[in-house]
Structures are given as structure tokens and as C-alpha cells.
């Protein structure tokens, strides 16, 4: 039986095929980082480090778990605000992220260990893989309800690959200074999602517009996603900063920027509404812009007021963009809404 | 156009004004703590500290994130149990907390650095700001559905100010020994909320009583809030304890008190119901009393059984209070219910 | 009034009785571990340890909080997928876990301190108590909707006792090497739940079958449980591993196994559905099998591909089991479904 001829077998075979490929590639290429290897203890004695705490695990693991929650609960539930897709949003996000992190570990590993025999995996790699997948989640937000799981898996395969190539070119070849988040990588994630939506765009999709209305309970579920993204963003921006003061400063800056962003988002959302009411979709999305925007510079000596200023303008611009780019003529509606959505949220970064 | 004459512009202008004020005040007064400053590395060498881990960040950051979740998800969703206000509860809680943490950083900072030129911010300040905002969240629970966002922002402004003044008088001037939570500060938060409700109390509000009924899904959302508050309370009570055994002990004591409180709350809730059934509102609220009550003494050598005894009586008293103070004559109904609610949950503390 | 004659007083009296017993037993037997005791600072100086960070608290507390979330939010909400029982699921799970952790602290403590006067409690004990309660939560999943709160408390009392006895016999008497999770302990948890269901099984319960249908919002709530279990499983498997590389490796192995498991679960769920659709109940449950299966060996040098292979087969076997063991003749339906459910999820382990 040809698998293409029978739609029913596509998803199972794609999943199994991809997973078998992962097993083989991990078998050939992936080993443990020294900090996760049984030889670490010997090495530690050799280097005369006295404490078990001097393992990368204790510097990064709490932040890793926060980022992990952002990818799976944060992005998953953020998208439940579209009533009809609530369920697919969480489920498909789970599927693509589970595949994406495996493929990102390999792709990012290859580019980072070009001349080594093996990729070595530690907690920092897990964080970077989650970052890369976050950019896929953003693009997923743009295509939600328009694609099948198989298409999503293929999109993930391509996006993670291009993400890693782009990252390698910028950081290693062009030697762009890209401390923390990096606008370039954020923008990459955004434009990838936009491009996919353009390709998939068909006029008759307008007919399904009413499916995008949000309802009470869906909004509360979406708030779960929003809040976990908002609360854990300081971990996102500080997860792979240098040890010590850099990690500390990145967390404080992000905290300040996010707080300022909430107030200006609320202000703009209310000002732009005819009756001065708040639109929950603005709040759910614009409040996160502060985290994205401060990402690039989070570990710099911005000063708390610098971070507040970033958040201040982010909340305004993001809400303005959301409102004015989405009320234009219907034929452009979907694409622009997508752009707007995509240009807002977070992506990914590669540090260390 | 005079902004007072036009209701519509009140919220946007209040938000923008407050946020601009925050930016200016942070610009004039706030700088990084040494542990979050780029000079930390030099200072570390001078002090001959060998490890990057000796940064306050690694002692406190995981607890900070837990407290952050309690303030935004915990308190936000706890209040969704009022069916009609579910959405406002989460959204307004988000708004007031985002403003409150900024203002608390300043107010608490000024009182702590009376003779310094600058306030210096580190992870401990972020935790203390979250504590202060938690007391505002409690008062918010008392006025939910009765106030506009603008009123909430003004209430936050006043409460955070008074909180900091009260804290300064008690801890610095009267030199009250107030390890950990402190009954005095808890009580402050409670009575503030009560006072606001008294001021806002109007008899015709009784008519909206049916809006306070809870429904199935609202209750499940409220359980999300309850559980995150309950689970992370050990982090709340240990977040700013002294390093080492004090932090460890505070977490264990709170864990024990909370566990005991669940059983006695269930016992009382069932005993006080005509048919022996459980009232979910009791469970959602009384179970948290154990965390509040043990707060003051959490880092003392209470012994595990001491903590259990605290939780034991808390569950009983809190449920009794909830039941007997809320079935009295209608005219007193609202105020008493508020008292009861307010006297129960948590507040804030200032340690270190 | 005889308490047996009046059903209404059963629950309050059981709760109060159990809690009083806990207070007395903790008073007689439980004290703080040295790391949580005020004498720790002296002891530290004697041992010439320079840093406060060398307290077990900083090694284990973030993992403890993750495990705590798994037990209360993870298991609680996982079971809301049964529409009618959503509320009882979360509430009763809360009650039994709050009692279970106290009793587990005592039982596990007695077996670990057979010749000492006191049980000493530290963060590692709290984690082990959560592990033990997780096995009760699994069994609870099997009896949900068939038992009263009083029966649940009694079941918890027995299961925690037997769990600790079983653990003692295997680890201390038979000296079974049981690094990490341990299949034996997992299996214990599973068969206990199965046995209870057999005892409680009555044919007429089939009539209530329609109550087990799941609905849209219940499924979204259940996904909250699933995702928190899935995301925090690396913490579960690494929480009580040896310091340093073991803990690091256990987290990486679990992460890999879980990711692989998602893809093969989706593949099998879709392949076994007549129209190739996904069954959310499979995804919600089978994806967790990867965490259980890798538990025993999580801190061994499995290599990342080894962990992927474990997850690969787990996803397949678990979904197959779920489908083929639940469509048999109605009389066996409940028991088998239970087995299947019970044999899947996680349990408990005892390390260190």
C-alpha cells in the first residue's frame, strides 16, 4: 500500500519515520556533556573544584523548567482563545514541540560542534532547543486551524533547520554581536510564520472567520497561557546568560519591562475602544511584547528605568499594531492579522 | 478636553500617567544591587569568593518565581469562583499587580535606603514587592465587582504606600521582632481591605448577590488558583529567610502546617453542612489559612508537630469563621463576608 | 451518639482523628534534619564547609516544588477528563494527598531510622513522601467515582503503609538494586489500585458508564494535568538522584524519553482510529509512559539514544494496551480499563 494514496496512514507513518530517524541520528551523533557524564566527578577532582554545586545543572535547571512550561503550557494555552481550535491548539502544539526539541538538539548541536565527532548534550542545550521550538510555536499561532498535523511536523522540520542555519550565519560567520534574545532571530521567527501563512492563504478562508471569535471560558484558558508566559519571561531572558550578575540583571530588566508593558497595553486598549472597554486579546498578547523587546539587551546595564522605557513603548506600539493592522479590507485581513500576531510574540535566542 | 469630564479617557490617562511617573522615579532613584551589577565580578574577587553561585540570585530566584506564580495565577484564579467576575478577576488582578510591584519597589526601597542616594534592586526586592502586592490582592478580593480599574489603581497606590509606612514604623522605629510573615502586617492587609469595602458599601449592592453564586467550571478554575497558592506557600514563607537552615526549616514548617490544615478544613466544612457535604468555597479558602498562620514563625524551631498544631487549629477556626460570620442579617452580610474573607488569606512580610 | 450510626459524622470524625494521630506521632517521633536545624551553622563550621549553599535545600528544593505540582495539579487535573467527576477528582485528590504525605513522612521515616530515637525530616523526605503519594494518586484514578472520601482516606492509610513495607523489604532486606524509579515499586502501585478496584467492583456499576464520557472543557482541564506531569517529569526522575552529574543525566534521559513517547503515542493513536483521528485520552495518558519507563534507569549512562528508544516503545505499547484492553466484553470492561490505566502512569521511587 502506497502511503501517499491513503490519507489515513500519513500521520502515523510520518511520526514513526521521524522518530526512527531521531533515534538513529542521536545514536550516531549525540552523547552527554561532561557535566552530565559519569566521568564528571573525576574531572572535577582534577580541576580541584570542591563542590557538587559547580555543575551547570544547578545554575540553569530551574530556569530550564520555567522555559519548558512557557513552551508547552504558555504557548499551548495562549492559542486556546480561538474557541473552535482550543483543543487542537494545545494538542498540536504538544506534538510539534516534542518533535521540534529533538530536531533542534541535533541541528544546533551540529553547528556548534562542527569539528567534533559528537554533539554533547547538557542542560544549556535543552534550553536552546526550547528557545528554537518557541519560534516554531509563534509561527504555529499564525497557521492554526489551516494546517494538518503532518503539515505542522514538516513545517517544524524546515523551520528548525532554517533557524539553526540563520543562527550559525549571524553568530559565527558574520560575528554579529547578539547578546541575549537578538532582534534578528526574533524577526526570523516572525517572518517564517508570515511566509508560511502567505503560502497557505486562500481567499475562501475568510468564510471561517467566525470561528475565530473567542468565548468566556476559552478566554480564561488563554489567560493561563498568557500568565505563564508573562511570569516566566524573566527566566526565558536569563536562562542562558553568563553566570552571576548577568543572569541576575537579565531577570530584573525583563521583570521591569514586562510590568511597564501591562500598563501601557491597558491604556492603549482602552483608548482605542469606542466605549473605553478593554479587549482581552490585546492584553493577552501585547503584555508579552515587553519581554520580547527587552530580550536582546536583557543582560546589558540598561538600568531599571531603561527597561521600563522599553516596556512602555512596546505596550503602545504592539497594541496600536494589533488594532490598526487588523481592521483593514477583508482580503488583506488574515495576512495582516498574522503579521501582527507574529511580529509580536517571542522567539528564540542563542547565547553563551 | 478636560479628562475628568470624559469618563472614557480616565483609564488610559491614569495608566499612562502612573507609568510615566514610574519611569521618571526609577530613573532618578533606582539602580542595580551589587549582585546584579557588572562590577560584581570585581567585587567578588576582592572579597575572595571563588564561586559564581555565591550570588543572591541562586539562593532566591526559584522561590521568587514561585511567589510570582502565586500573585498572578494564584490570586487571579482564586477569585474566578465568582461566576460573573471570573474574567475581571484575572485581568484586573494582572493590572493592579503589574503597577503595584513597581510602586512597591520604590516605596520599600526608599524606607530601606533612607540615607542613600539610590535604591538598589536585587532579587530580594522583587520578592518583597510581590509580597506587598499580595496584600493588595487580598483587599482586591474584598472589593471585586464593586470597583472600576481606575479605582483599583488608586487603591493600589494608597495601599502600597500605607503598607510600606506601616512596615517601616513596626520594624525600624518600634523594632518589633517580626520574623517572617508577621501577624501585624497580615492584619494590616486585612483591615485595609475591610475599610475600603466599608467605604464602598451601599445597601443596594445586595441586589447583585446572586452574581456571587459559583458554577462548575468557575470552581475548577478557582481550584487552579487555590492549588498554586497552596503548593507554593512553602516558597512564600521561606523566600526571604536567612540562607541555609532557616530557609530549609521555613519550607518544612509551612509544608506541615498546610497539610494539617486541609484535613481539619474538610472536617469542619463537612460537619457544618446539613447533609455532611463539602463546600468547595471552604476548601478553597480555609486550606490556605495554615500558610498564613505559620508565616510569622515559619523559620523558628517550631518542630514539625508544632507546625501541624498551627495548621490543625487554623483549618478549624477559619472554616468556623467563614460559616458563622456569613449567615447573619443581610445588612451586615457583605461587610462581614468581606472581613471573613480578608481575615483569612495571606498577605505579606518583610524579612532580611 | 455512636459515630458509626450516623453517616453524617463519619468524614469529620475520620479527618479529625487522623489529624490528631498525626500531631501526636509527629510530636513523639519527628524532628528536623541537621540541614534544617538551627545547629546546622555550627556543624558547618566544624566540617569547614564555607558556603551556605552546601545545604541539601539548594540541591533539591526546585525539584521538590516541581514534584509537588505534579502530585496536586498534575494528578488532580489529569482525572478531570471524566466529566461528572471533575470536581471530586481535584478535591479528593487534594484531601488524600494532604493526608498521605504526612503518613508517608512517618512510615518511610520509621523504616529509614529503625535504630534511631527520632525520624529526621529534610527536603529529601518531603520528595519521597510526594513520590509515595503519587502511587496513591494512581490507584485513586482507578477508583474515582466509586468511593467516598472516608474510603479514600482509609485506602491511603493502607497503601502508604504497604508501600513503605514493600520498599523496605526490597531495598533493605533483599538488597535489590533499584536505582531511581524501580519497576517493582511502579508495579506495586499499579497492582494495589487494581486490587482495590476488584474488591469494589459491582456489575451494576456498568450503568454509570455514560458518566465517563469526556467533554470539551473537561478535556482542556485534563490537558493542564497532563502537561504539568509531562513537563516536570525530568524533575520527578532526578529529584533524589546523587548530586551533580547523576541528577543532570537523569533529567536529560527523562526529557529525551518523554519527547520520543509523544510521537509514537500520536502515531499509534491515529493508526488505531478508524478514520485516522487522534484520541485525546490516549495522548493524555500514553505520553506519560515514557517518564515512568525510564524512571528505573534514569541516572544510568543510557545515552540519549537509549532514552529515545525507551520512549519510542513505551508510546507504542502503552497506546496498544489502552486500546486493546478496553474494548473487550462489558463485564470485564471496568476492571481491564483500570488495569490498563493503572499499569500506565507513574508511581514512586525511593533513592539515595
Image: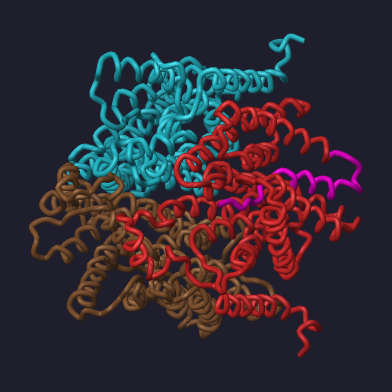
Chain colours: A cyan, B brown, C red
Q: Which quadrant of the view contains residue C277?
A: top right
The residue drawn where x is 48% and y is 21% is A106
Pinpoint residue C204: horizontal percent, then vertical percent: 90, 57
Pinpoint residue A93: horizontal percent, then vertical percent: 54, 33
Residue B7 shows in the view: no
Residue situated furthest bottom in the rendering: C1
Q: Is C330 colored magenta in this rendering?
A: yes
> In the displayed structure, does residue A125 sit left or right of residue C153?
left
The front one of C144 and A129 is A129
Vertical relation: A171 (above or below) C269: above
Q: Is A218 colored magenta in this rendering?
A: no
Vertical relation: B161 (above or below) A322: below
The front one of C292 and B136 is C292
User: If the image is split into quadrants, where does the C terminus of chain B sit?
Assistant: bottom left
> In the displayed structure, does residue C99 sit left or right of residue B5?
right
Pinpoint residue B325: horizontal percent, then vertical percent: 50, 83
Q: How many marks?
A: 0
Pinpoint residue A3: horizontal percent, then vertical percent: 71, 12
The residue drawn where x is 78% and y is 44% is C340
The residue drawn where x is 47% and y is 75% is B303
The front one of A114 and B219 is A114
Q: Which quadrant of the view contains residue C283?
A: top right
The front one of C166 and A51 is A51
Residue B214 shows in the view: yes
Span of residues in magenta: C327-352
Vertical relation: C171 (above or below) C315: below
The residue drawn where x is 25% and y is 63% is B157
> In the displayed structure, does residue B284 sit left or right of residue A228?
right
Amino acid at each position: 500500500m502506497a502511503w501517499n494514496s491513503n490519507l489515513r496512514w500519513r500521520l502515523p507513518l510520518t511520526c514513526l519515520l521521524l522518530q526512527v530517524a531521531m533515534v538513529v541520528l542521536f545514536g550516531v551523533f549525540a552523547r552527554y556533556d561532561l557535566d552530565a557524564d559519569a566521568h564528571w566527578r573525576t574531572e572535577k577532582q582534577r580541576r580541584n573544584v570542591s563542590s557538587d554545586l559547580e555543575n551547570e545543572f544547578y545554575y540553569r535547571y530551574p530556569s530550564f523548567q520555567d522555559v519548558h512550561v512557557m513552551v508547552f503550557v504558555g504557548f499551548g494555552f495562549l492559542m486556546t482563545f480561538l474557541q473552535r481550535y482550543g483543543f487542537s491548539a494545545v494538542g498540536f502544539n504538544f506534538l510539534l514541540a516534542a518533535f521540534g526539541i529533538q530536531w533542534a538538539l541535533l541541528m544546533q548541536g551540529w553547528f556548534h560542534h562542527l569539528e567534533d565527532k559528537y554533539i554533547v548534550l547538557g542542560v544549556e542545550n535543552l534550553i536552546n532547543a526550547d528557545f528554537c521550538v518557541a519560534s516554531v510555536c509563534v509561527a504555529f499561532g499564525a497557521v492554526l486551524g489551516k494546517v494538518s498535523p503532518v503539515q505542522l511536523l514538516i513545517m517544524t522540520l524546515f523551520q528548525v533547520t532554517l533557524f539553526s542555519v540563520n543562527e550559525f550565519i549571524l553568530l559565527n560567520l558574520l560575528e554579529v554581536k547578539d547578546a541575549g534574545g537578538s532582534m534578528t532571530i526574533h524577526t526570523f521567527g516572525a517572518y517564517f510564520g508570515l511566509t508560511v501563512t502567505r503560502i497557505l492563504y486562500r481567499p475562501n478562508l475568510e468564510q471561517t472567520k467566525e470561528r475565530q471569535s473567542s468565548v468566556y471560558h476559552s478566554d480564561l484558558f488563554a489567560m493561563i497561557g498568557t500568565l505563564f508566559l508573562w511570569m516566566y519571561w524573566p527566566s526565558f531572558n536569563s536562562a542562558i546568560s553568563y553566570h552571576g550578575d548577568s543572569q541576575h540583571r537579565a531577570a530584573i530588566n525583563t521583570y521591569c519591562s514586562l510590568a511597564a508593558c501591562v500598563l501601557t497595553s491597558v491604556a492603549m486598549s482602552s483608548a482605542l475602544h469606542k466605549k473605553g472597554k478593554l479587549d482581552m486579546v490585546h492584553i493577552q498578547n501585547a503584555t508579552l511584547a515587553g519581554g520580547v523587546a527587552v530580550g536582546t539587551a536583557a543582560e546589558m546595564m540598561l538600568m531599571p528605568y531603561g527597561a521600563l522605557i522599553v516596556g512602555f513603548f512596546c505596550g503602545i506600539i504592539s497594541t496600536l499594531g494589533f488594532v490598526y493592522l487588523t481592521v483593514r479590507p477583508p482580503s488583506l485581513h488574515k495576512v495582516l492579522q498574522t503579521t501582527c500576531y507574529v511580529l509580536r510574540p517571542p522567539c528564540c535566542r542563542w547565547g553563551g
